[in-house]
Amino acid sequence: MAGTVYLVGSGPGDPELLTVKAKRLLEEADVVLHDKLPGPEIIDLLPADRSEDVGKRAGGERTPQPEINERLVELAADGKNVVRLKGGDSFVFGRGGEEAEYLADHGVPFEVVPGVTSPIAAPAVAGIPVTHRDHASSVSFVTGHEDPTKAESAIDWEALAATGGTIVVLMGVGRLPDYTAALAEAGMAPETPVALIERGTWPDQRVATGTLETIVDGRDEAGIEPPAVTVIGDVAGTRARVLEFLENGAGADDRTEPTADDGV
Ligand code: SAH
């Protein structure tokens, strides 16, 4: 009998942000196929004798997607229950959609298990709400992987700037100078707050903040590296107050009750 493939999102990296279902499936799986994005703490929890790292091959190359697809089909045909574990949510820039299509085309039973996605979770733990009644009524998730100057770029930065909502860029550390310039050119104010959250919820999470004009220097000074998300918009400017509250709030000895003036 064919096994089932579970396309499981791991969440951003904190093991306590795995869903209850993800945790159960990881415990029960015959094989777990993963890459590095779930982060060191979740990878440490995986059963070493039943796990395959399909993220990188020797030489630092990515395992080609067709190879991963074939491996999933092969294992299922062999009767194995497989967890395909991806960082965040598999269907958000995670190629989960391609894997689902491939499995469907090959008649392999599969199930999709959503995960806590990093463009929401990493800003959240850094004190940034991606929407806010006073600051942003929409949010766009965008890949920063593309060259904004190339003619056939799929991303209309001008249209994004015009939404007035929050923009969260994934895979956008390297091209930060290009798309901040594209947004400035599209008329976004140079003082628009911007935050970079590196390794959100990992033990070594880091945050760099600045504005559309200064964030490239901020990135370079802090040495921010992938994986990181870029949050662009007024919500990034609310961070300081929220953090102050978080630090003085839950769990702190000197907790003070918020007053109406705090706007909370
Ligand atoms: N499926 C994932 C996204 C995969 S694309 C999700 O739903 O979160 C890879 C990009 O995700 C990285 O380049 C980075 O921009 C972002 N990312 C993933 N995990 C992250 C984390 N813990 N902190 C910050 N960014 C993260």
Image: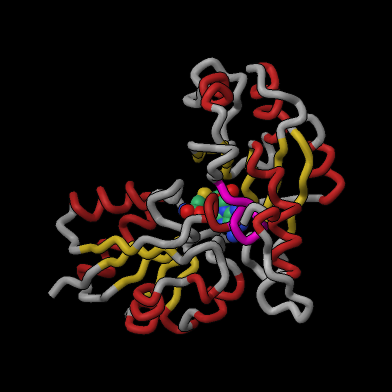
Residue 96 located left or right of residue 48:
left
Q: Where 159 sits versus 146, above or below?
A: above
Q: Residue furthest right?
A: 221
Which quadrant of the structure image shows residue 136? Answer: top right
Residue 193 located left or right of residue 69:
right
* Relative image position of residue 122 (x, y in whole percent): 60, 56
- Residue 114 versus residue 147: which sits nearer the camera? 114
- Residue 237 versus residue 228: which sits nearer the camera? 237
Which span is picked out in magenta? 122-130
* Relative image position of residue 2 (x, y in whole percent): 16, 71
Which residue is drawn at the image coordinates 69% and 39% (left, top)?
Answer: 174
Instruction: Check residue 127 for magenta coloring.
Output: yes
- Report if residue 60 is visible in the image: no
- Report if residue 148 is visible in the image: yes
Residue 30 located left or right of residue 251:
left
Which residue is drawn at the image coordinates 84% and 38% (left, top)?
Answer: 217
Instruction: Check residue 113 for magenta coloring.
Output: no
Which residue is drawn at the image coordinates 54% and 59% (left, top)?
Answer: 57
Number of callouts: 0
Which residue is drawn at the image coordinates 58% and 50% (left, top)?
Answer: 129
* Relative image position of residue 203 (x, y in whole percent): 69, 71
* Relative image position of residue 96 (x, y in whole percent): 36, 52
| Colour pattern of the rendering | secondary structure
Q: Where 47 sits versus 157, above or below?
A: below
Name the quadrant of the C terminus: bottom right
- Residue 168 versus residue 191: which sits nearer the camera? 191
Residue 37 located left or right of residue 79:
right
- Residue 101 versus residue 262: which sits nearer the camera? 262
